[in-house]
Image (spheres, rainbow, N blue to C red):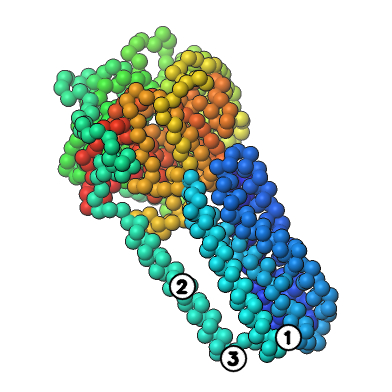
Amino acid sequence: MLWLMVNFAMTVLLPIFGGIAAWNASRAYRAPTKGKLYSRLRSSLIWTGISGLALFVKATAIVLLGVSGWLFVEDKATMQLPMVAIPAAAIVLFSIPAAKAIRAAAVKASKEPLMVQDRLAAAAPGWVFPVLVSFVGSLAAAVQALFIAQWPLKTGTVIAVWSVYATFVYLLWIRQKRNYCRFVVTGSPKTGTLAVRISWKFGVLLTVVLVAAVGFMFGAKASRLPERMSMADHMHAHTGGNAPQFVSVTELTGPRTGTPDRSFTLEAKKTMITLPSGEKKEAWTYNGQLPGPELRVKQGELVEVTLINKDIDEGVTIHWHGVDVPNREDGVAGLTQDAVMPQQKHVYRFIAEKTGTNWYHSHQQSSKQVQMGLYGVFIVEPDITLPQKTADMAVVLHNWQAENGTSVSLGELNRLQRKIAEPGTLVRLRFVNAGNMRAPIHISGVPFQVAAIDGTDIHEPKDLTDSRLDLAAGGRYDVTFVMPNMVVGISRQTGPFAHDGNALVISPSNEGVPPDAVKGPIFDPASYGTPAKTKFGPDTRYDRNYKLVFDNRLGFYNGKFTFVHTINGTIFPDAPMLTVREGELVKMTFVNRGFDDHPMHLHGHHIQVLSRNGKAVTGSPWIADALNVAPGETYEVAFVADNPGIWMDHCHNLDHAAVGMSAHIAYEGVLSPFEIGSATVNLPE
């Protein structure tokens, strides 16, 4: 992450430094006195030196990034770096010696007018031109970094960028030569009357503004999503229409008959809440609760949930995050169902096959609706009697947007919570991150174990003390410990536990203050626990291999100019549609060469993490459905294609998904009859 940020910072700073150097170099020959000439040359050399230092830092960052793989640097090495390094070499060979010679002939602070030969030397293209080209190159590199994030990098893109760059350089050379020749003939540094010069500059500025405005309008229009788009058509566009058409997602349901073992009704409605600051805020809730009702079922039970939309105008759904339900029950508007509009209802039915901590949330405009409160916990318990007394608690982490900034919660809404547990009780805390960012968790006062990740048990977990848990957006950690005869604290920050702070305190007698939360080592799932046999190993032969490269760039999405997050250089609906067949073993490689975390969530399946940054997982099998891929990281993961359907594979920073960071896994022969777009009720993210 460090070197990605360093490279980007230098890419942005180089046009600034180079622009100041070029400005002073291009104006040197117009200096009224030798002292002013000396000053402009000195300033140009200083800023050229600063640019050179920034270029050195950028080159170092690119080399160090290259250690992680060519993929991280291919655009930087083939376009950005050469566009700046080549003119930098010309500056060292020609511009700096010439500038020093000219400056030596000038007199510091002298008010003596310049001679014609002084002006000719200062205007010579041989010294000015490389400085100007360096600025053009750094500007082109910045434009490429900000607007062209592409993988795989196409030869045509490289040729196009270099062609535009070369054209600008050629036109710049023609202009410099023309001005110099005119100066030689006239002996005057001024080209035309003041009115002519102002008119020319105004014309150039107006042309740039008009071109930018036209480009902006066309870009905004071209980026608008269709008013109606079928996911079936989207799949055909990515598979060439060769898949057999024999099953619809509407047929991939849970049991439609039989008496359910557990029945729930969830009513989506608007509810006023009060934040700790006293600010009253409208929330969208299930059954008026924040989080929504905690749903607990037993493994193997038939579950029926009736969703009723009371007054959420945008429509709602329920996605069962972490539960590998049949495709029709997945709750994605426009893919597996239509959004449930006000005064409508929808029934979900599925068998709770796998134990674990899961959660549910709306998958209609999810970046907004989850933030507004449409989420809750769904727990599948083993159908056995536990051998000892237990205290089982779900703790949901969330971030609220308030007028005075972001308000975080741990369990209840920004309040100190106290729970009682007798010494010797087995405590199980089920942490669920319903926010968009990684969430830190600090536990003090007791050694603990991470018993499960994303609903899957860890094999032979070990005791941890003061370790910080960094929970991925959408992810879950189950933490267990035996209650000691002292106070235990859980907090999202280090330091003392405030009596009115956002924390959870567990004690034998509902009294006392836990030890301070300290800044311990970050828990690493890759080396935690002990190995166990799974379907995947170093000798596994995979039927499909896919690579997903995450990046950032400026661009348009659905008519708005924004900072988009891309998968393989594209955004939905052009993001990858990865096809599989039932029964196949699928391997995916995630590469993040952007600047933000991307917690990737594959619906309907759990993935096994095979390696991180080229190093194999050495601990317990790491099974997840929300894997946080930090900047600069590379993960290899695998899954079994055992749940037919069309499934979202998207970033669970839902703000990223809202600007197109959504791919799909599609089983051959499965189609969806549902449509998305502004002319429909379906707005999935």
Residue 161 or residue 199, whichever sits in front: 161
- Judge left or right: residue 435 versus residue 261: right
Mark closest to the chain's N terminus, 2 or 3: 3
Residue at the disc numbered 1: 32
Toward which corner of the image does residue 623 lie, by quadrant? top left
Whether residue 381 is situated above or below residue 406 in the rendered picture: above
- Within 10 Å of disc 3 (Cα), the crowding (few <14, some 14-19, many 20+) is few
- Residue 83 at what x, y percent from top left? 61, 58
Whether residue 366 is situated above or below residue 423 in the rendered picture: below
- Residue 460 at what x, y percent from top left? 52, 15
Seen at 61% across and 62% down, the residue is 137
Q: Regarding mark 2 in the picture, which secondary structure is present there? A: helix
Q: Is residue 610 visible?
A: yes
Given the image, on which type of amino acid does mark 3 rest?
Thr
Given the image, on which type of amino acid does mark 1 rest?
Pro
Whether residue 480 is situated above or below residue 498 in the rendered picture: above
Residue at the disc numbered 3: 193
Toward which corner of the image does residue 649 lie, by quadrant? top left
Which of label 2 and label 3 is nearer to you?
A: 3
- Residue 599 at what x, y percent from top left? 45, 37
- Residue 540 at what x, y percent from top left? 47, 21
Where residue 209 is drawn, which disc sits there?
A: 2
- Judge left or right: residue 661 versus residue 595: left
